[in-house]
Image (tube, grey):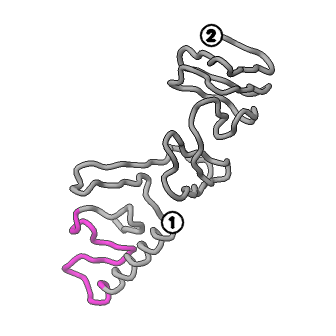
Amino acid sequence: MSKDKLTEYDATATNNTDVGGVNLQESSMLPSDVNNAIREVMSHLKDFSAGTSGLDVLSFQDDDNSHQLKFQAPSSVTTTTTFTLPDGDGSNGQAIVTNGSGTLSFSNAGGGSFLGESGGGLGDIIRVHENELNTSVTVATNTNGLCAGVLTVASGATLTINGTLVIV
């Protein structure tokens, strides 16, 4: 089978007998076939480094290759998105958030934030594993709030609901 992308190559070298339509069977290979195959592999490497042909799982291995960290796209991607990572590693308690246009930055996590916004009612509040609301928050009309478990409002903080309050 012709290998037309890096992701199609086999980990067993002898199984890579057709690179981009260049026959590499040892019994019928010409010296020019080797040159053409090398050129074909180089074009595959260029496509990969340019981001036009990629992997479905990005894997980072530790020093002895015994464990990996992997990033994987969802099974169905609806749009091509480029995420730009922030510089540095943020501060203690911060999380990576998006501006909705692919630019990622560090922002304080929890404590009454609206997906990176503070008290503006610009997005849905999603609270997981947070027991106490310790900053004032307004839940604007047509936004959602969710808490997994009990949520208490700390002394001095307020929770303002504009619209319908549903307690389940």
- The image shows residue 22, relative to residue 122, as above or below, that is below
Residue occupied by mark 1: 51
- The image shows residue 132, relative to residue 106, as above or below, that is above
Residue occupied by mark 2: 168
Residues under labels 1 and 2: Cα distance? Answer: 46 Å
The N terminus: image quadrant: bottom left
**Residue at left offset 75%, top offset 35%:** 120
Q: Between 81 and 123, which is closer to the camera in this rendering? A: 123
In the picture as drawn, the residue positioned furthest to the front comes out as: 156
Q: How many marks?
A: 2
The C terminus: image quadrant: top right
For label 2, the SS is loop
Q: Position of residue 123 (x, y in %)?
A: 71, 34
Left or right: 132 with respect to 138? left
Q: Residue 55 lies in what quarter of the image?
A: bottom left
User: Which region is colored magenta?
Assistant: 12-34
Query: Are circles 1 and 2 on residues that touch, CB within 8 Å?
Result: no
Left or right: 54 with respect to 144? left
Report the disc number at residue 38: none
Left or right: 62 with respect to 121? left
First in sequence: mark 1 or mark 2?
1
Q: Position of residue 77 (x, y in %)?
A: 56, 47
Left or right: 70 with respect to 111? left
**Residue at left offset 80%, top offset 25%:** 141
Q: Position of residue 28 (x, y in %)?
A: 23, 82
Binning the other alpha carbons within 10 Å of mark 1 as few (below 14), some (14 to 19) or many (20 upward) gives few
Q: Between 11 and 130, which is closer to the camera in this rendering? A: 130
- The image shows residue 168, relative to residue 4, as above or below, that is above
